[in-house]
Amino acid sequence: MLLKGENISFGYNKGSLVLDNVSIAIAPGEVVGLLGPSGCGKTTLGRILAGYQLPEKGVVTIDDKPLPTVGFNPVQLIFQHPERAVNPRWQMRKTLNEGWHPSDDLLEELGIEKQWLTRWPNELSGGELQRFCVARALGPETQFLIADEMTTMLDAITQAQIWQVVMRIVRERNIGMVVISHEAHLINRLCSRVVDFKNINSPDLFLV
Amino acid sequence: MTDKKDSTAENSPAYTSNEMLLEVENLSVAFRQYNKGLQQMDLKVISSLNAAVKKGEILAIVGSSGSGKSLLAHAILGILPKNATVTGSIKYMGNELTTKDQERLRGQEIVLVPQSVNFLDPLMKVGKQVRTSVRNENPVEAQRRVFERYQLKQSVEGMYPFQLSGGMSRRILVSTAMVSGAKLVIADEPTPGLDPKIVDEALLHFKGLAESGCGVILITHDIETALKVADNIAVFYAGTTVEVAPVADFSGTGQDLRHPYSRALWRALPQNEFIPIEGVQPLPQNLPCGCFFQPRCERATASCAEKQPEAREIRDGMVRCIYAS
């Protein structure tokens, strides 16, 4: 069962493509790093693979079927700025339980304190909010996880804390993972395979 | 700025050179808040913070969000909100910085390079924006000279911010600081989320400012950025300075670092051990007794919870830990 993007093309402006006929496949249990300078299309590819954006050309499939358009998305995306990824008018409990009900064990493991559940997003720090975003993305139906600069805005200790939990769960549940980052050290530490966007013009490199 | 100086403040010989540009000692900032109805409370967000920067030197301030990094910048510039109370001492060129001084110096001798390129005026041509900060010479000449230095074509001066790339906008922001003839430049998170090439370019600009005799304070949450250009690194935790160390001490397993938090931060980097310590930085409303790091510290003892450790000078650096050596 693979998550596949085949012959994906996408551009924000007419006449220029950010992604030109790119193909990528991720297997369950695999951790793939996407490395490259800003503006090279890493985030765009992540959004397309998670179904947030439709490609101009090409298809995204999971287990050779198109991504479901209703219900819990098996491809979950975690964004760089958690404060922009939660509803500012919802208390954290509501945000956390929107897609599924994370167990107390998971919350404890992620270091989410009970008293945070009744807080509003503006009362929590970026690191605290990002823990919620991770928890809500790890539902039982999650098969693939895309982390787009998930810990770029966080200090080194918080970064290591979050990755430690995520990597353990990913391994345990055989989730396929895409790590988007411009930090080579982080990618080298986490990933079993690295896709460098410098090689974007040779799409074959992306296939498993 | 009140002039109350803590008698426990320690001055090291290194901190009293005549080249000293800015010296912050035992700075505390509290915000007055309304709890319920008319009940007021003072929330201390910065306590006993120290930092010092010399001419031609880059001091990096490293800490997680909420550690008080940006508030320090705002306190130096005197742009804290009205409900803030500041105690402790900020000295600029050896003299206590008063509110009047701050108003006179900010934007001239002390300038802020803001975090986001959104701080450029969207409706003013960038050449004009740079010219408005020139003080002592011909604005057009000064602006053209700095553009040449930063490899910005002359046609750029007639452009609006939306026509520039991120890297160009950043060069405009630094140009503004350059032409102002500033002596102290405070850069607040100038490089978050940028790819390494642009980060290096931006850092080179700050290095250039320091080489021209400026003092630079570089505020960042990213140690790696700090390591590339800084002379000294101040580590902030929960609104206090836990350590100030020469950049060379951030190496190996962190054995040369003085404070357990700095060591933990260093060891948590992906290129080092990538092993985190447990817990989170406490919020200002529930700070622990004694040393703020004590509940997360593996070496903590009962005496750590008694009172906040005073700043001590150790090996060309400063540390707030009773066990540091």
Image (cartoon, helix red, strand yellow):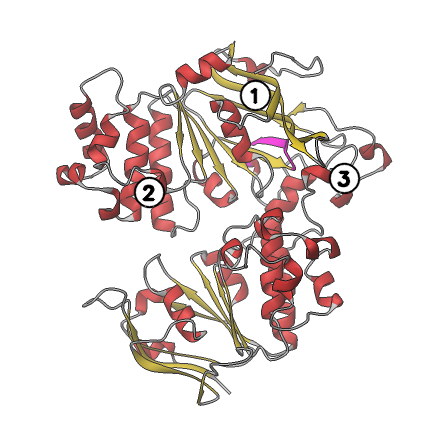
Q: Amino acid at mark 2?
A: Glu
Q: Is residue B253 visible?
A: no
Q: Amino acid at mark 1?
A: Val
Q: Residue at the spot x=30%, y=23% of the render? A: B180
Q: Which residue is mark 3?
A: B294
Q: In terms of depth relative to the viewer, which is nearer, B98 or B21?
A: B98
Q: Nearer the viewer, mark 2 or mark 3?
A: 3
Please state if A196 lies on the left or on the right of A76 as rendered. left
Residue A166 place in picture, x, y as percent: 61, 66
Q: What is the quadrant of residue B43 in the picture?
A: top right
* Residue B178 falls inside the magenta stretch: no
Residue A71 makes an appearance in the image: yes
Is tag 2's residue or tag 1's residue first in the polypeptide sequence? 1
Using the image, tell me which numbered label, if any, was put on residue B201. Answer: 2
Q: Which residues are magenta?
A: B238-248
Chain under disc 2: B
Q: What is the distance, in whole Å, between disc 1 and disc 3 at their CAs?
A: 24 Å
On whether disc 2 and disc 3 are found on a single subunit, the reply is: yes
Q: Quadrant of the N terminus of chain B?
A: top right
Q: Which residue is at 40% across, 36% downward?
A: B114
> Please, which residue is most extreme toward the right here?
B302
Give the residue number, with chain letter if any, for mark 1.
B24
Q: How crowded is the residue under tag 2: few (<14 C-alpha within 10 Å), some, or many (20+)?
A: some
